[in-house]
Image: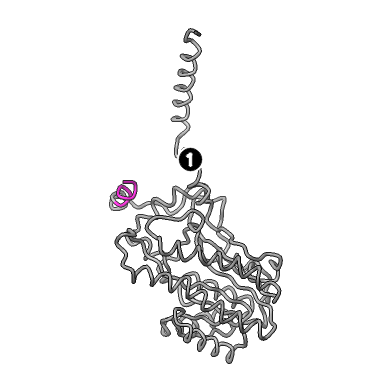
């Protein structure tokens, strides 16, 4: 009912994307790491043509890395590569491949290694997701999400891991997951299943591959507004009403920005975080914790309403004290 009311409300008035407290939580879009942090290094980003992948490619390139962006739509990748090269002054290579296909992944990484050198920074960002009642999903729909998210991440990770181990090169992997791996979520069951599998794979490989100089971590973003840049936002919020509901669940009073994901990603991929491995870092504006607290929605209660409730509680206590003791 809340969601339905929000849709109705949205047709009659424009809702704000921020709350008053957001002024205390400003978005910092400039890189927090020093210039040249990734100079001489090659980064590979799946799903790098749009959304968060594009934002991370921009920041890695700005900090000195040569970047390969991998995805299925070559024309989008080529356009993004041209744009990012002009902004960063560093090489950006567009590679077309479907991460579900191990042979295609191998061919794409062969090209990256030939053109830019063996990547030592790997970002698994390619994903697929949509909202749907689970009973409406066909077996093929469920399988498609698992193949893109879980199997696709495994294909890239295993191919790159084998190359790095053979070359005796250390590396840092980062995978973008989600906050609902912790407790699950209705209406995105294939994604929740796949992302939880990824996090276990990352924890397991962090223990196994540390001996080769390889670190693996995850970032679990909350609601990040990627706007119209072809990210997941439009697929998960087709009516625009989700934003009206979600903003009330964010203690910081605003949505996340792709630059904030990029800054955290770059930190975890850099040597500044070399003692962190096998971890998933939440970046959700406090959303997960807020949703878990039974009485957290009382933040919507006004001071006047609190005065009234306090008066009612005092009256109830007084009645209890006035009752004759048996």
Instruction: Judge whether residue 152 is colored magenta.
Output: no
Q: Position of residue 90 (x, y in %)?
A: 59, 83
Residue 166's image quarter?
bottom right
Instruction: Judge whether residue 5 is colored magenta.
Output: yes
Which residue is more in the foreground, 228 or 177?
A: 177
Q: Which secondary structure class fits the magenta region best?
A: helix
Q: Which residues are magenta?
A: 1-7
Q: Disc 1 on helix, strand or loop? A: loop
Pick out the residue farthest to the bottom: 114
Residue 313, compared with residue 74, is above or below; it is: above
Residue 116, compared with residue 50, is above or below; it is: below
Residue 271's image quarter?
bottom right
Residue 200's image quarter?
bottom right
Q: Position of residue 75 (x, y in %)?
A: 41, 84
Which residue is more in the foreground, 168 or 68?
A: 168
Q: Position of residue 41 (x, y in %)?
A: 65, 81
Is residue 53 shown left or right of residue 243? Answer: right
Q: How is the image coloured?
A: one colour
Q: Position of residue 144 (x, y in %)?
A: 38, 72
Is residue 188 shown left or right of residue 207? Answer: left
Is residue 211 shown left or right of residue 223? Answer: right
Q: Estimate how packed mark 1 is, as few (under 14), some (14 to 19) or many (20 or more) residues with alpha carbons within 10 Å.
A: few
Which residue is more in the foreground, 37 or 108?
A: 108
Disc 1: which residue: 294
Residue 87, compared with residue 228, is above or below; it is: below
Q: How many marks?
A: 1
């Amino acid at each position: 009912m809340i969601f339905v009311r929000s849709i109705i409300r949205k047709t009659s008035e424009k809702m704000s994307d921020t709350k008053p407290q957001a002024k205390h939580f400003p978005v910092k879009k400039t890189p927090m790491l020093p210039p040249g942090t990734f100079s001489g290094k090659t980064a590979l980003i799946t799903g790098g043509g749009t959304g968060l992948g594009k934002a991370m490619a921009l920041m890695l390139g700005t900090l000195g890395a040569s970047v390969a962006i991998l995805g299925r739509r070559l024309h989008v990748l080529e356009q993004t590569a041209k744009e990012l090269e002009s902004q960063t002054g560093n090489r950006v290579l567009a590679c077309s491949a479907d991460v579900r296909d191990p042979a295609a992944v191998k061919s794409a990484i062969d090209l990256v290694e030939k053109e830019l050198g063996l990547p030592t920074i790997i970002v698994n960002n390619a994903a697929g997701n949509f909202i749907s009642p689970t009973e409406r999903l066909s077996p093929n729909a469920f399988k498609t999400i698992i193949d893109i998210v879980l199997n696709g991440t495994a294909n890239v990770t295993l191919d790159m891991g084998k190359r790095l181990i053979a070359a005796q090169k250390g590396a840092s992997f980062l995978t973008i997951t989600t906050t609902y791996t912790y407790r699950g979520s209705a209406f995105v069951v294939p994604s929740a299943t796949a992302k939880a599998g990824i996090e276990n794979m990352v924890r397991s490989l962090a223990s196994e591959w540390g001996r080769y100089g390889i670190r693996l971590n995850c970032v679990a973003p909350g609601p990040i507004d990627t706007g119209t840049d072809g990210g997941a936002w439009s697929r998960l919020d087709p009516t625009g009403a989700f934003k009206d509901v979600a903003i009330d669940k964010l203690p910081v009073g605003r949505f996340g920005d792709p630059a904030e994901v990029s800054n955290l990603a770059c930190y975890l991929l850099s040597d500044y975080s070399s003692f962190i491995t096998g971890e998933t870092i939440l970046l959700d504006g406090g959303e997960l914790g807020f949703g878990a607290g039974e009485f957290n929605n009382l933040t919507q209660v006004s001071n006047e309403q609190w005065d009234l409730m306090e008066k009612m509680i005092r009256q109830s206590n007084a009645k209890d004290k006035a009752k004759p003791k048996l």
